[in-house]
């Protein structure tokens, strides 16, 4: 640590004074060559308390030996957590080396996408936790057969196909269909929600629904909008017609249809990805959209966007397509049936990863986090207190080509009243936690 950085750590410690407890830590992270995408996401996750607590418990409980990416992450969090000093700088060297070993995407020193990293990290963590990787390797051995007696290689291919199909269909939500057959882990308990993909044939009116789980949600953005508006348009009905007709199993032919995506189950921690990097066909490349998208400190997600429909309401990890039960095409109808599950869910913003710079292939990431009611800016090694008012500067700009291109890219919200313990919430506990988020007057 250079003397100037230790001075800035001392300055921060002084500025924090007694407003923050002594056992909270604020450590800048050293940059190992364009690793700001990684540092900014790690800081956001460290101040996600259920996630941090679970990581520390994991680091303290597991036997050493396998040094996978999750171990490296949890060790890093434990190192930060165990520091005697409240402020300082650490080098996440072991974690970055492991990350580069695991995924060639992150091996170069080029600018990387913070969302891709977050998505990879969370999925990798779930796979490590439920040990699927081991089992898949086991099954991929020649001669192995699966439970149905099929050669394992074929089964693995089928599973991969299903995953790909889900990835295509769920491109909007980063769904990971393969997860359905897997064990739910504490990462799921914190970040996982469920989307329902509804398709209604306009000829026979049959509604087909398919559930997809997500660990983060990718939202299309528009100029001068808000996160709430983006969430609303997420559920807009899309018409499938002309060259884009839908194959209806009831009609046994291509038909015009209506398609809609709904959030069926909201997570405890809602990680939102604003799709600011858009492929422009005319340009043949990606362009950064610095659109102004307001993200509120308190995000109210209407229950009707995420009601737990009668069909399979709120089951965690249901492997069955919800289409087995009659599904209602209009949420209003469903809402009338499940009024108490329809309460708004209130989320509090606790971290934002900000992309700084004009283009998608270069730039910088920083993050702002909320800890003990203070807002802090983490810029690799540097950590400083910021005013809450200054966050509005990261909403984006109202015109293209404007100077201010420091914009909110990943948003982290925690549901009010969500269980703080990372232990697996049962669907019932999850639901009651959510529905109690906004107390409604009980009918007398
Ligand atoms: Zn039909």
Image (tube, helix red, strand yellow):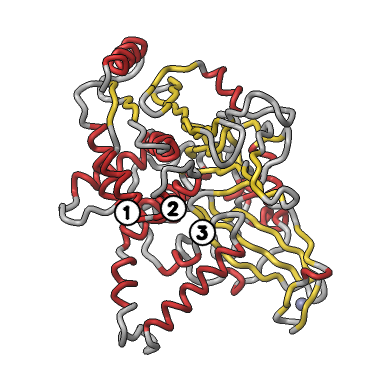
Q: Which residue is mark 3?
A: 213
Label 2 C-beta lies within 8 Å of the nearest ligand 1 atom: no
Q: Which residue is mark 1?
A: 101
Give the CA separation, mark 3 to mark 1.
28 Å
Crowding around mark 1 (Cα neighbors within 10 Å: few <14, some 14 to 19, many 20+) is few
Residue at the image position 30 percent from the left and 71 percent from the top = 135
Crowding around mark 2 (Cα neighbors within 10 Å: few <14, some 14 to 19, many 20+) is some
In percent of width and height, residue 164 lies at 53, 68
Q: Quadrant of ligand 1?
A: bottom right
In percent of width and height, residue 302 lies at 64, 43
Residue at the image position 67 percent from the left and 71 percent from the top = 208
Secondary structure of the residue carrying tag 3 is: strand
Secondary structure of the residue carrying tag 2 is: helix
Comparing 86 with 116, the one in front is: 116
Q: Is residue 94 visible?
A: yes
Q: Quadrant of the C terminus?
A: top right
Image vertical order of residue 305 relative to residue 149, above or below: above
Marked residue nearer the N-terminal end (3 or 1): 1
Image vertical order of residue 86 relative to residue 337, above or below: above
Q: Residue 105: which disc?
A: 2
In percent of width and height, residue 356 lies at 55, 30
Q: Quadrant of the N terminus?
A: top left
Determine whether, in the image, residue 23 is placed left or right of residue 330.
left
Marked residue nearer the N-terminal end (3 or 2): 2
Residue at the image position 45 percent from the left and 46 percent from the top = 118
Q: How many marks?
A: 3
């Amino acid at each position: 640590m250079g003397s100037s950085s230790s001075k800035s750590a001392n300055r921060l410690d002084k500025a924090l004074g007694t407003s923050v407890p002594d056992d909270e830590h604020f450590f800048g992270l050293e940059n190992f060559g364009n690793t700001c995408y990684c540092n900014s996401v790690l800081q956001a996750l460290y101040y996600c308390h259920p996630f941090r607590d679970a990581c520390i418990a994991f680091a303290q409980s597991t036997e050493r030996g396998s040094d996978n990416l999750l171990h490296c992450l949890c060790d890093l969090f434990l190192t930060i957590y165990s520091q005697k000093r409240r402020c300082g700088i650490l080098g996440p060297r072991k974690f970055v080396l492991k990350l580069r070993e695991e995924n060639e995407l992150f091996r170069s020193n080029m600018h990387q996408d913070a969302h891709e990293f977050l998505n990879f990290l969370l999925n990798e963590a779930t796979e490590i936790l439920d040990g699927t990787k081991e089992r898949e390797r086991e099954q991929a051995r020649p001669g192995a057969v699966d439970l149905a007696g099929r050669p394992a290689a074929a089964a693995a291919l089928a599973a991969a196909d299903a995953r790909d199909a889900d990835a295509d269909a769920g491109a909007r939500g980063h769904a990971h269909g393969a997860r359905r057959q897997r064990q739910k882990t504490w990462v799921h308990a914190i970040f996982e929600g469920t989307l329902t993909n509804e398709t209604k044939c306009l000829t026979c009116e049959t509604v087909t629904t398919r559930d997809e789980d997500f660990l983060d949600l990718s939202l299309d953005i528009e100029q001068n909008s808000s996160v709430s508006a983006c969430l609303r348009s997420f559920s807009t009905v899309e018409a499938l017609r002309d060259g884009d007709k839908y194959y209806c199993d009831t009609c046994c032919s291509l038909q015009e249809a209506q398609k809609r995506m709904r959030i069926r189950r909201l997570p405890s921690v809602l990680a939102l990805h604003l799709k600011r990097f858009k492929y422009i066909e005319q340009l043949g490349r990606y362009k950064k959209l610095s659109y102004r998208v307001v993200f509120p400190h308190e995000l109210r997600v209407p229950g009707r966007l995420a009601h737990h429909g009668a069909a399979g309401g709120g089951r965690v990890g249901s492997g069955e397509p919800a289409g087995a039960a009659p599904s209602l095409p209009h949420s209003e109808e469903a809402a009338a049936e499940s009024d108490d599950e329809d309460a708004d869910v209130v989320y509090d913003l606790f971290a934002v990863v900000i992309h700084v710079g004009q283009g998608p292939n270069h730039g910088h990431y920083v993050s702002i986090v909320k800890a003990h009611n203070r807002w802090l800016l983490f810029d690799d090694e540097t950590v400083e207190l910021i005013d809450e008012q200054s966050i509005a500067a990261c909403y984006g700009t109202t015109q293209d080509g404007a100077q201010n291109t420091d914009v909110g890219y990943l948003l982290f919200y925690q549901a009010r009243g969500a269980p703080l313990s990372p232990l697996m919430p049962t669907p019932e506990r999850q639901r009651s936690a959510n529905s109690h988020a906004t107390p409604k007057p009980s009918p007398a």
